Amino acid sequence: MGEEALPTKDRIVRAAAALLADGGRDAVSTRAVGAAAGVQAPTIYRGFGDMQGLLDAVASYGFRDYLRYKVERRHPEDPVDDLREGWDLHVGFGVDNPAFYILMYGEPRPNSVPAAALEAEEILHQLVGAVAAAGRLRVGVERAAQMVHSAGCGVTLTLIATKPADRDPELSTRVREAIMAAITTDTPNPAETSPASHAITLKAMLPTADSGLTDAEAALLVQWLDQIALRNR
């Protein structure tokens, strides 16, 4: 399908994405996007509300294929290895697509998170949840996901900010393994697993288990499990 045959909003997003990839954030102005997409500024504002709305749409467009692959890829049987692979994919995508990555993670806005960032967060929680369900997580799913996300973003932004010739080729692997050592355990053997790990595992399995509990009972159980995990770290 030629660009001229695309719906107007798609044409605008693609035009903005091309400008971003070629010239960075400063190249994406209303005037430049309008000229590239063959539309006037009011059309952009009607479609996206404001420039930030357009940039969020561009971020989602830039991450679309990457996120789809991250879900549809062949996953390793070991959930910890799967989490490792997810880390490597994240860092690799960011380094290869710095403009899109910085647009997504370089200027965080807690009250306005792009849809693609929410999707990426959900994928990470699923990967971490699988580690927990296998009895291999030392800390709660939420905390583990935050640790992986913050460390992964930090590594990626650091590599992006460093000239390719000066990048430490072992930085990502070393930080990844430090995080893995902090949040995972080598064995799911019940006799060698702490009460905290058991509590974390049970909490991770609750959403898919037919527990027969009411919503109130399930919420109370989650509170108890959180307390066990917190007091037996």
Image (cartoon, rainbow, N blue to C red):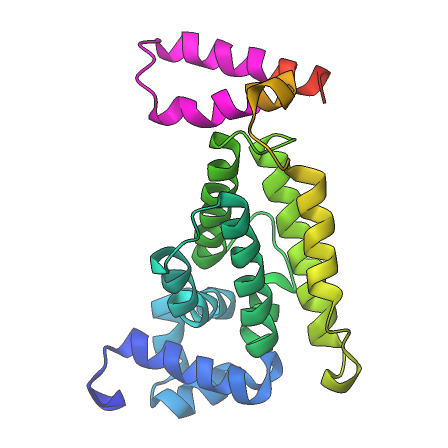
Residue lying furthest right: 166
* Left or right of 147, for residue 203: left
- Counting every numbered tag in the picture gives 0
Q: Residue at x 40, y 84 (%)?
A: 15
Q: Residue at x 70, y 52 (%)?
A: 177
Look at the magenta stretch and give its main secondary structure: helix
Report the span colored magenta. Answer: 200-225
Query: Residue 4, position in %: x, y?
Result: 23, 90
The answer to which of 62 and 58 lies nearer the viewer is 62
* Left or right of 57, for residue 171: right
* Left or right of 130, for residue 90: right
Give the quadrant of the N terminus.
bottom left
On the question of residue 26 being in view, the answer is yes
Q: Residue at x 59, y 82 (%)?
A: 24
On the question of residue 112 being in view, the answer is no
Give the quadrant of the C terminus.
top right
The answer to which of 136 and 165 lies nearer the viewer is 136
Quadrant of res 104: bottom right
Q: Is 222 part of what is drawn in magenta?
A: yes
Q: Is 218 part of what is drawn in magenta?
A: yes
Reply above or below: 209 against 122. above
